[in-house]
Amino acid sequence: MKPYRLAWLALAMNCLLAQAQATPFEIDHDKALPAIHIDHDDVLEGSASLSMRNVLEAAYARNPEQKLLQALDSEAQASYARAASALPMAPAAGLRHINDSLASGRGEREWEAGIDLPVWLPGQRAARQSIAAHARQGVAASREGFMMQLAGLVRDTVWDIAMRENSFKLAQYRLDTAQAIQKDVMARYQAGELPRTDTMLAEDETLKAQAALMRAEAEVKHARHRYTQLTGLDILPARPTEDLSPIRSLQDTHPLLKEAQARLALAADELRLASIEKRENPQVNIGARTSRGGFDTQFNSALTLSVRIPLDAEVRSAPMLAAANSNLARTSAALDRLTLAMQTMLHEAMHNLAVTHAELEIATHQRALAQENLHLAHKAFKLGENDLVGLMRIQALATEAERAYLNRQTQMKWDIAKFNQAVGVLP
């Protein structure tokens, strides 16, 4: 490269360096970040007199699903009232008049009034009564099934709070431990026993523990808020533990299965009714007629009786039977799918119980080993046989072992509640 080109390149580099030194990149550490303030504390106190069943009842009373159940109950009552009626449909009144004033004009007059009374088809009333009975049973089964589903939400919400509180307690333990180590390290640094890097390392661990505690506290508040929204309560059961149900298989009496079975029975009744109502109901007309002939001054009166018998036609019956068959098939398929899903849920619940029990035994041994190792590490650090990094690593292992132990304890109780949920046992 030519000498003058090297000179120009050096000059350009010097200019760039001078500009960079004149306008350095700086971070404004003093600039305040925007703050978000939460107006609720979500404080829940434990109550020894409050049971899980009380919590479930509070959640049921608060849930808007009750409006649907009330509507279904009214529908079932209306179906029963229709089946108990003397007539399958409402009667109809008719009036008929004939005169020849605009035609021959001979004074011919005729008045006829009557009422049409529909008649039950053979087996129709019994079919409607069966539908009304299964509709009532379906409403009761829907209420039990809804309570079962709501029980699952309540159980998960309560035990989620327990899990979050475990994390909060461990975060508080981690902060307390970090602050104690930082205090010890600072004292030994001032005595000239430890370098400045150890104090910065200990302070960094304290700051991390403070951030973890804030996040854990927020998660606890979120879980408590979900509980309050679900139940409307500001207290928690002090002892939410459940006894393991002795049932080991899926029973037909499970509330969710009973609800699906009631729907299937109702769909079968509706198909039976559709096969009966392929034609319209016969009608009996009872009336009176008054008539006067042409150039006659006297009226003649008579009673009338007529019968109307509709005939069956596929144009009417085929769509009704097809819709009823489709509804029965959908309901049957839904019951089969629900049964398979619940069998899978029960299998997983039983397996999770066994796995969690084994994990709890392992976590118990790990916790004991970690506590003993931590005790020895503290002694070694005070005697100068171990550095701060080694102590903090062992402290982290002990905290993780404690976390695993507490979580497995809580998870065991939660899995018992999930097993009871799978076999259809309410709290």
Image: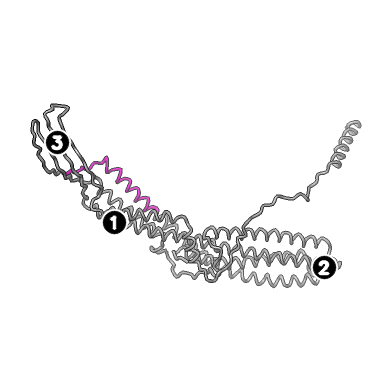
Residue tagged 3:
110
The amino acid marked with disc number 1 is Ser
Q: Are marks 2 and 1 in contact (CB under 8 Å)?
A: no
Q: Position of residue 268 (x, y in %)?
A: 31, 53
Q: Residue 107 at what x, y percent from top left?
A: 12, 31
Specify which label sits upstream in the sequence, 1 or 3: 3
> Looking at the image, is mark 2 or mark 3 nearer the viewer?
3
| Span of residues in magenta | 307-334
When asked about the image quadrant of residue 412, the answer is bottom right
The residue located at (78%, 69%) in the rendering is 381
Q: Amino acid at mark 2?
A: Ala
Which quadrant of the view contains residue 9? top right
Q: The residue tagged with tag 1: helix, strand or loop?
A: helix
| Horizontal and vertical percent position of residue 196 | 83, 61
Residue holding disc 2: 187
Specify whether residue 324 is painted magenta. yes
Tell me whether the residue at label 2 lies in contact with that at label 3, contact meaning CB atoms closer than 8 angstroms: no
Locate residue 45, reporting x and y percent: 58, 66
| Local SS, label 3 | strand
Horizontal side, residue 64 vs residue 83: left or right = right
Q: Residue at x 18, y 43 (%)?
A: 114
- Residue matched to label 1: 130
